[in-house]
Amino acid sequence: MIGLERMKRISRTSTSRIVFLVMDGVGGLPHSVTGKTELESARKPNLDRIARDSLCGLIDPVGPGITPGSAPGHLALFGYDPVKYDIGRGIVEALGIDLQLGPDDIAARGNFCTVGDRGIIADRRAGRISTARNAELCRLLNSIAINGAEISVIPVKEHRFVLILRGEALSPELADSDPQQAGLAPKKIEALSPRAERTAEIANQFVSQAGSRLKNEASTNMVLLRGFSRRPDIPSIPEIYKLKPAAIAAYPMYRGLAKLVGMEVLPTGESIEGQVESLCQHYGDYDFFFIHFKGTDSRGEDGNFEAKVQAIEELDSALASLLSLDPDVLIVTGDHSTPATLAMHSWHPVPFMLKSRWCRPDNVVEFSERACLAGGMGRFAATEIMPLAMANALKLDKFGA
Amino acid sequence: MIGLERMKRISRTSTSRIVFLVMDGVGGLPHSVTGKTELESARKPNLDRIARDSLCGLIDPVGPGITPGSAPGHLALFGYDPVKYDIGRGIVEALGIDLQLGPDDIAARGNFCTVGDRGIIADRRAGRISTARNAELCRLLNSIAINGAEISVIPVKEHRFVLILRGEALSPELADSDPQQAGLAPKKIEALSPRAERTAEIANQFVSQAGSRLKNEASTNMVLLRGFSRRPDIPSIPEIYKLKPAAIAAYPMYRGLAKLVGMEVLPTGESIEGQVESLCQHYGDYDFFFIHFKGTDSRGEDGNFEAKVQAIEELDSALASLLSLDPDVLIVTGDHSTPATLAMHSWHPVPFMLKSRWCRPDNVVEFSERACLAGGMGRFAATEIMPLAMANALKLDKFGA
């Protein structure tokens, strides 16, 4: 890794195009009966044909043993050290509902919850109230006024909301009020540094006024806050790589992440066919395309092995028209593994392939975990993908004289 | 590597158990006649069966080309950066005789030696005197009294002793008196920083008084000191990983190292059968077990290829009862290589395997240097083992949202 500052110095524009296809959670584990992973079980002639012509490997998004959330997983793919650019829970939640945040806005993830007589939390999720009910309660909280900060409360799904604090000289260095378990009282929000003391006061006033306004609301009589955070100060992809990047993602959170790193978000249908159609339509207008395929992760999290295999096959079918564009560089990988047998994100390294006229193909002829192990890249850090992509697009100058 | 501070935040307790079997010095080199390493020459059905179900690889304890001492080798296995947590020779020597050191105690490794008329060292090891004679001489030195420090001189084996300085505002930043070769005079002990000047004076007074008391002792008429050091300020395994760890080690030094990182040391017989018996007895009481097997290193250092092969086979036989416990995570590796052909610790990477329900097995079917090269982890840093162990034990939360 030469670092983003040095990447800026050696990046250059050219007419070549990079297509970066992220199969969310694509990595898997062997099925207990067949001994084959989801990728090994799928019929996927297009993916395997790409593997034949590609440089293959296995990526660690964060590091061995570390299970990435979606934000660090994607940041690593785009070349950002996910430990350095740590994105808070509040910001991720805000990205997830496509909120535009200013650089100084502070976001926190909120829950409506149920507290008993003595202020003890009985249910951290207020019985998972309906999203409609949530919207009503958020309207109630939006009338809260506090000196020194503008308050916005935006409903998410069920019991979840985002709190935005906007004002001068606020600081996100605050501890959570959410004790993360029932049977305890919500915690007073503490400043984690002296400069956050005023913000802590404001946040505590919000909680106290919210409590007053909700006190007759039975099961939704309190709020919990966690993950106070600000949009990270992150150099953009156009800045670092001199690329004109576009994102084709159906889910708001990935669109939000893409915007955060300076991508334009293209209109798209929700299916992978719709996404590839969007790619074909805008192919002349950008030189970098991030396509986010959600199906592999969703079916993996459901614990549905067969459905994840189907999702892979569905994507494979949609690849024909993508391949007809013959992109100068095509990358296929994932932001983490989501083995159906585990039914959650996992730490296992993720198969990777990069096809270009200038890649050095290895002997891998199948896109799968075990096959990619023998690839030319071996096991490597996800943050090294972008330099590799840029090099294969002939968009990087020599390093040093 | 996300760092130990972040590991603390994502570690959690659970009922799963990790067994970490360290075959000291297990890595080897090919025999000049057969072309096979010690591991490749041994009959070891249990180790090979574990490899079949495991994630395999080769670890670098410190880094390519670097031969680790026992302390850095083990620290790396337990997740500590061995370059950051540099443990001095004096401390290692003290751990080796199971000395309990306070956080401010300063330890140095001492040698009795022979000096000639003009103070020139004739023999750095005083003819390797008996341990009994050593104990007598140490009693003599223990009567030395110096203002500002309490002095303890504790005999080790043959010509070796440990000097402990205990007192207020002492500093271990001292150069050695031992010039590491005969034909030179012992050096005056220099302070390496201004705050160590008083300690340097104390140490030099000790050397001078020791010289007076030993002057009629013929071949043991002087002392040499090296490796002044203090117990490192090292976060413990319970702190970082929220584990309740136990060590089953027959040799004092490994017990000392285990205590240093917060493990409880269990009573055990000296043989590997005795060690496995201890594991079985205490299996319900801890969730992490470090088992240290010394035979492979000792026979390697002897330069006895056949005996090292036998040590591997002996360990393999003892594995049956260990395997009957069916630990949630089983790791087998070493702290460094000790090829019998070299007859010393070496820099060669060490075979590694990790078996768990959630590991992603590769195609390796044999526990050996060459076979593990094709493993799912490839070649990797030993410090990454602990995150991997914790992940496979499902004891780690997701990193980031």
Image (tube, coloured by chain):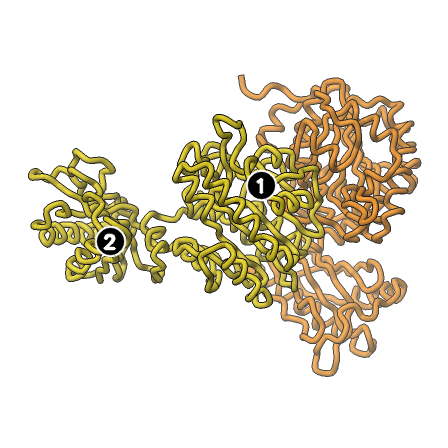
Chain colours: A orange, B yellow
Count of picture labels: 2
Report the amino acid beneath label 1: Arg
Q: Please rate how many residues cluster around mark 1, counting C-alpha atoms within 10 Å: few if below 14, some from 14 to 19, many from 20.
A: some
Q: Which mark is residue B131?
A: 2
Instruction: Judge whether A369 appears above or below A93 on screen.
Output: above
Q: Which mark is residue A86?
A: none
Query: Which chain letter goes with mark 2?
Result: B
Q: Earlier in the sequence, mark 1 or mark 2?
A: 1
At 73% from the left and 32% from the top, the residue drawn is: A372
From the viewer's side, name the closer residue of B207 and B96. B96
At 84% from the left and 65% from the top, the residue drawn is: A139
Q: In the rendered view, does B393 fall on the left or right side of B222?
A: right
Q: Which mark is residue B43?
A: 1
Q: Position of residue A379 (x, y in %)?
A: 65, 35
Report the amino acid beneath label 2: Thr
Whether residue B151 appears in this view of the structure is yes
Whether residue A85 appears in this view of the structure is no
Quadrant in the rendering for residue B257: bottom left
Q: Position of residue A26 (x, y in %)?
A: 79, 41
From the viewer's side, name the closer residue of B365 and B93. B365
Q: In the rendered view, does B251 fall on the left or right side of A292?
A: left
Tell if the residue under mark 1 belongs to the same chain as the one under mark 2.
Answer: yes
Question: Where, quadrant-wise, is the N terminus of chain B in this rendering?
Answer: top right
Helix, strand, or loop for circle 2? helix
Q: Nearer the viewer, mark 1 or mark 2?
A: 1
